[in-house]
Every structure is written in C-alpha cells, then in structure tokens.
Image: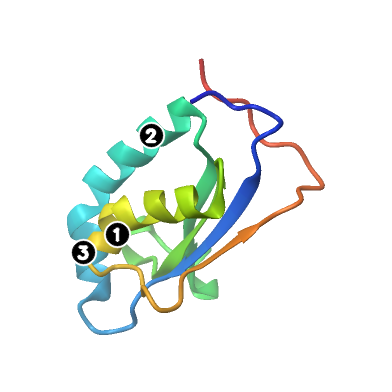
Amino acid sequence: MSSTPSLPKFVVWAPDYTDEGALGRRLAVRPAHLENINKQISQGVLRVGGAFMTPESVDAAAADRKFRGSCMIYEGESIDAVRQLVEEDLYYKTDVWDKEKIVILPIALATGLPPVPS
C-alpha cells in the first residue's frame, strides 16, 4: 500500500511490560520485529516509529539503553486495521508490549511525514 493523503493517520503508544524478563523478550525477537517493520515502511503503512527509553538512556551506550515501549504512526483504512497490524507484531505476540496499555488514536498531524521509500 502506498502512502495516500486521504488515508487516516493513527498514533500507537505501546508500552512494554515491566517485569524482569520484558527486556530479554524484546531483544530476543527484535531482529525479526525490525524485518517486519521495514516491510511495513516500504509499503507505506508504517510511516514513523521507534522505541522510547528512559531519560538516562539518551547518552548511554547502545547495550546499556533501557527500553520502555514503542511509538509509531501508521496510515490505515481504520483504527481496526491498525489494531490488527499491532496485534500481528512480534512484540505483541511475544508479550513485549503490555496489551492492556496499548493506545491507538487518530492523529491530525501538524507536520509532514517522511516520504515512503521507493
């Protein structure tokens, strides 16, 4: 699916579980998660995304960063279509993201998004 201005945008706030094994689960599936994310980016479905971290992680070495969840902006036909994408993600399926705390809301962007890779 290519990016179309008429498609609604949705922001996804997906905090991680906070149990002792959460970071290990995240790191175990991260390569496969990123592979899927890159496919969604090239399709124009996922427009921007990344992990959010603790404030002290800003200056930390990559191995010392403490992840707390993910934030993404999707384009989709509906909130249900975006929810389906989230629920198909490995972070959702492997209990990285706290399923009870995920928030998906429509967003009216005040800025542009990066172009869809061609």
Marks 2 and 1 sit apart, C-alpha to C-alpha, by 15 Å
Q: Nearer the viewer, residue 100 or 63?
A: 100
What's the residue at 51%, 48% (across, down)?
A: 49
Q: Is residue 59 above or below residue 32?
A: below
What's the residue at 64%, 36% (across, down)?
A: 7
Q: Earlier in the sequence, mark 3 or mark 2?
A: 2
Q: Closer to the observer: label 3 or label 2?
A: 3
Which residue in the protein does label 3 denote?
Answer: 94
Badge 3: how crowded within 10 Å, few (<14), some, or many (20+)?
few
Q: Position of residue 40 (x, y in %)?
A: 41, 35
Q: Is residue 98 above or below residue 85?
A: below
Which residue in the protein does label 1 denote?
Answer: 91
Given the image, on which type of amino acid does mark 2 rest?
Asn
In the figure, residue 104 lies in which quadrant?
bottom right
Badge 1: how crowded within 10 Å, few (<14), some, or many (20+)?
many
Given the image, on which type of amino acid does mark 3 rest?
Thr
